[in-house]
Amino acid sequence: MSEYAIEIKNLQKKYGRQTAVEGLNLTIEKGELFSLLGVNGAGKTTTMKMLSGLCLPSGGDATLCGYSILRDVGEVKKRIGVSPQETSVAQNLTVLENLEFMCGVYGFHKEKTREKIDEITEKLQLKEVLKKRAGKLSGGWQRRLSIALALIGDPEILFLDEPTLGLDVLARSELWTVIRALKGKVTVLLTTHYMEEAQELSDRIGIMKDGKLLALGTAEELKALTNTKKFEDAFIAIVKGESR
Amino acid sequence: MITFAKRTTLEIIRDPINLFFGLLFPVIILLLLRTIGSHTPAELFSLDSLAPGISVFGLSFMALFSATLVAKDRESAFLQRLYTTPLKNTDYILGYLLPLIAMSFLQCAVMYLVSLLLGLKWSVQILLCIVAIFPAAVFFVSVGMCCGCLFSVKQASGICGALLTNLTAWLSGVWFDLKLVGGWFQKIAECLPFVHAVKFQQAVLNGSIENAMNDLYWVLGYTAAGLLLAVLLFTTHERAKS
């Protein structure tokens, strides 16, 4: 079994003549919170979609917990949880019914469903909204529910695609607390275009542009690489190619 | 699949607009046409003709429900989330299809119940009519699923909510006898399943199924094609796109 949670080898995705992801090589350790940072169209979401089995790569391969996304997609799906960029919750169901639904998707029996819902409700502090319809919740609560749904199947790897997109400062801060609490317990691959989010939450950051991974390291390492004091300046320098 | 079907049911019945269009609107149409019929001698507006016709017309709303739900699930990435879980293709397809078929039976039963209250003569054929709505129900729900796979919520609502309901109404011979228009209009109508679905229902109600086997074959053909297309779209198009 692989020592890495995720091993990406020369991963590529092309849509016709357009290259969305080009020759991506990357390893992510178990329990690590890794962020893919980049502007819109950098290839972050496409990378996540390939890794979660939503689309096939045009070239290369990746293994998740030792299972290939090309050959063992069924095994991969048993080990991942995905919170897409959109809130992706059942709008007319209550929060509790959404959680019960996802327990049903994973085939949990009645007792395990109750235990799992208690655990997730506690972990993500959902108790006060359990009986509210998901469609009536604020954006922040819907995102929290979305992460809760992704955690139901006890994933070893959690994908969070732009988890705080469109949230206000307070909701974002609350969601960061939730995400921080997951560190070390589950491997998290997070995509974002918010620099402060990547800096605040991540063990390591990969900066992508035009489908390519331009730089990789901790926020401090990336600042040192570009001789900058602020992470934002480091990001701009890397994306503009001034670090070389 | 049961989990998914339960969720589909809750999503639909918790929308009051769905309940209005699914149950109340066809009843209103029936009452309206019956009122018109009571002032005209036209056989078309007798309960023997109207109840089967409006039962088929009501199915167009099932297409609308399936189209908007599938399109919403696509647009909100709810389906995308589920594609990363161990659910199988059959779970999605049956999870959408079965609750809407059950709702179609319920809608049909309500139509015949109201018709009985309005004076339709009771016979065991009425129970057969409810069962016989099955192929047409599968056709309409499948068409809705196809639209939900291919179009946005707004487009799918327009196509199924306006276009399909009107096609069903005008080309099924419920509102007027197609022979009155005749020509190319009648020919087109007879190439589509709507009028055949109504004729089959009417034949079942009248106890003369043997005279409507040709109509049944038309409906079954369209149902098979619609269902096959829905399955193909779900298994290939949806995954490729997401």
Image (cartoon, helix red, strand yellow):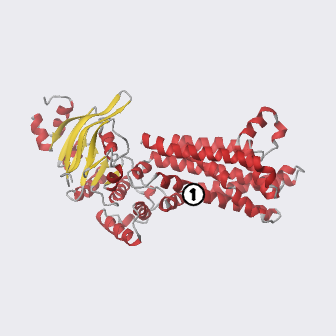
Vertical placement of B108 versus A200: above or below?
Answer: below
- Residue found at the far bottom of this picture: A111
* Percent position of residue B44, x then y: 84, 49
* Percent position of residue A86, x then y: 39, 47
Vertical placement of A239 versus A78: above or below?
Answer: above
Dot 1 surroundings within 10 Å: few (below 14), some, or many (20 or more)?
many
Vertical placement of A238 versus B37: above or below?
Answer: above
Q: Is residue A104 visible?
A: yes
Q: Report whether B54 appears left or right of A50.
A: right
- Residue found at the far top of this picture: A17
- The residue tagged 1 is B98
Q: Is residue B34 visible?
A: no
* Percent position of residue A154, x then y: 31, 61
How many badges with numbers are in the image? 1
Quadrant in the picture for the C terminus of chain B: top left
- Residue found at the far right of this picture: B41
Give residue A57's quadrant in the image. top left
Q: Report whether B121 appears left or right of A92.
A: right
Vertical placement of B28 versus B241: above or below?
Answer: below
Give residue A10's quadrant in the image. top left
Q: Residue at x 72, y 55 (%)?
A: B28
The residue lying toward the viewer, choosing from A84 and B100, is B100
Q: Residue at x 20, y 47 (%)?
A: A28
The residue lying toward the viewer, choosing from B119 and B229, is B229
* Percent position of residue B64, x then y: 60, 48
The residue lying toward the viewer, choosing from B139 and B217, is B217
Q: Could you say whether the residue bearing mark 1 is in a helix, strand or loop? A: helix
Residue type for callout 1: Leu
